Image (spheres, helix red, strand yellow):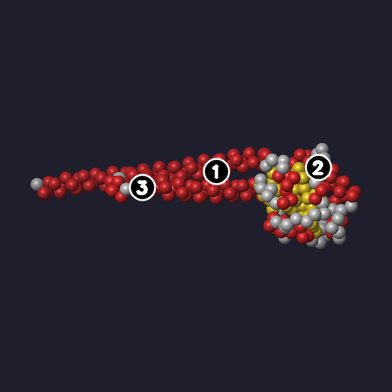
Amino acid sequence: MQETWSRLSLAAQFVVTGSVVLLMGMAVIGIWVTDRIEEGVTRNSASSTALYMESFVAPLIGELTSSNELSPATRRSLDELLTNNELGRRVISFKIWKEEGLIAYSSHAEIIGQRFPTTPNLLAAWQGEVTAEFDTLEDEEDARERDRGLPLLEMYSPIRERHTGRIFAVAEFYATAETLNKNLLVANLQSWLVVALVTLMMLGALSGIVLRGSRTIKQQQIALEGRVNELSD
């Protein structure tokens, strides 16, 4: 291999080495760019949906500021939020969390009053941050949503008291992500095409410069060998 490598021209050696280095760089940049795109799109979608949901949910659950349970009337009002309206087409289910993993309300009534392990996203929401995960649903309480077999965006949004700003509950909700999934696929494909095109342009431009230099060196070597032969004769 070393002998074969040494017989290659300078331009050929550069093309081989440059291709490996640039392809590795393209892979790293492409992965980083697609991650940033997915994170940005997910966060923006989560923030807009969380604001939309909070405007409906927060006015109904004020009693949770001093209690861990909701009245039957409040539960019925929350049940009606996802019935035959635009919100119900965007959000398929949601939960209201209290401290220590207690579910004060869920669109799946059988888990109301149960406690589940606190996830990092839930903890972040208690700290005032809107969080989201795209197409995961690996937590214990996500069994019903996971059974749907649809791409979902799982979001957590803090619910605050109007006057004090204190977080007294966290809303977790699941929005359909089929359109978001398609948009992310298109965005990722476009980013990879751009990165690949730029990489090929860089390799082509640099290879052209090295090729001209390699030809010049080769011509000088041939001329020098000819002079040496003449002097030897």
Q: Give the residue drawn at x 66%, y 45%.
A: 135
- C-alpha distance separating marks 3 and 1: 27 Å
Q: Residues within 10 Å of mark 3 (few under 14, many from 20)?
A: some
72 left or right of 28 in image: right
For label 2, the SS is: helix
Residue 35 seen in the figure: yes
Q: Mark 1 = which residue?
A: 191
Residue 153: where, in percent of width, then height? 69, 46
Q: Earlier in the sequence, mark 3 or mark 1?
A: 3
Could you say whether the residue bearing mark 3 is in a helix, strand or loop?
helix
The amino acid on which the numbered mark 1 sits, given as a three-letter code, is Ser
Identify the residue shown where x is 87% and y is 53%: 70
Q: Amino acid at mark 3?
A: Phe
Of 115 and 106, nearer the camera is 115
Q: Earlier in the sequence, mark 1 or mark 2?
A: 2
Write down the quadrant of residue 170 in the picture: bottom right
Q: Indicate which disc, 3 or 2, sits on the residue closer to the N terminus.
A: 3
Q: Which of the 4 quarters of the picture holds residue 216?
A: top left
Image spot of residue 99 (x, y percent): 78, 60
Q: Nearer the viewer, mark 3 or mark 2?
A: 2
Among the 4 quarters of the image, the one containing residue 222? top left
Mark 3 and mark 2: span between their CA atoms? 62 Å
Residue appearing at x 89%, y 52% in the figure? 71
Name the residue tied to disc 2: 82
Residue 14 bears which disc, if any? 3
